Image (tube, grey):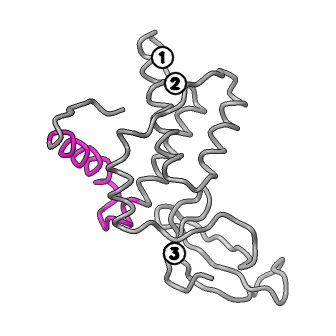
Amino acid sequence: MFEVGALVVYGSDGVCRVEKVGPLEMQGAQKGVDYYTLSPLYRGGTIFIPVDAQVRMRPVMTREEAEDLIAHIPEIQGEKCQSHNPRLLHERYQTSLKSGSCVELVKLIRTIYAKGRGAADKGRHLGQVDERSKKQAMDMLHGELAVALDIPLDEVEDYISRTIQRAQKSDGTEKTQD
């Protein structure tokens, strides 16, 4: 059980603060059931979830876990996109987004970046499903990294780039990132 004030990652909503744990005094709430009241950090709204619900909710990664993830980003490979069907793409992307795994988010981002480069080489643009899914994956990943690293959200992308470049310079493997 998460305590009030805890920072958690809740599904594809990203990082949320637990504001309250207890029964809800509102229409439609089950009597005798405790709920988490969550406030997303990077968007508005409030989320109510029964404490005993089987949902993907976990603590935010630690600073060490965040730094380890960033160090391994160059090794995380995207997947080859086989489908051009927007419905199938959406389903595939949603699986990664709902997984709760930062590694899956990195894979998804790298997959869509590679797809975008291929499209650009042919004079095309990414579709809406790709663009929306990439943005959502980046928002989720960057939000958690910002909290774990205790840096502003808008500095996360530069932090990742600088960290990877420093690591590559120190081991002599300068590569471009996706």
Q: Amino acid at mark 2?
A: Leu
The residue nearer to you, when weighing 47 against 57, is 57
Alpha-carbon span between mark 2 and mark 3: 34 Å
Residue most extreme to the top = 122
Main secondary structure found in the magenta portion: helix
| Residue position for label 1 | 119
Alpha-carbon span between mark 1 and mark 3: 39 Å
The residue nearer to you, when weighing 79 against 170, is 170
Q: Picture coordinates of residue 58 (x, y %)?
A: 57, 68
| Residue position for label 3 | 17
Q: Is residue 35 magenta?
A: no
Element type at marker 2?
A: loop
Query: Marks 1 and 2: CB-CB under 8 Å?
Result: yes
* Dot 3 alpha-carbon crowd within 10 angstroms: few under 14, some 14 to 19, many 20 or more: many
Residue most extreme to the front = 171
Question: What residue range appears in magenta?
Answer: 145-169
Q: Is residue 159 magenta?
A: yes
| Badge 2 or badge 3: first in the primary sequence | 3
Asked where in the image residue 129 lies, by quadrant, the reply is: top right
Q: Picture coordinates of residue 56 (x, y %)?
A: 65, 63
Give the number of the disc on residue 126.
2
Element type at marker 1?
A: helix
Quarter containing the N terminus: bottom right
Q: Amino acid at mark 3?
A: Arg
Residue ID at (65%, 20%): 84
* Left or right of 139 on screen, residue 26: right
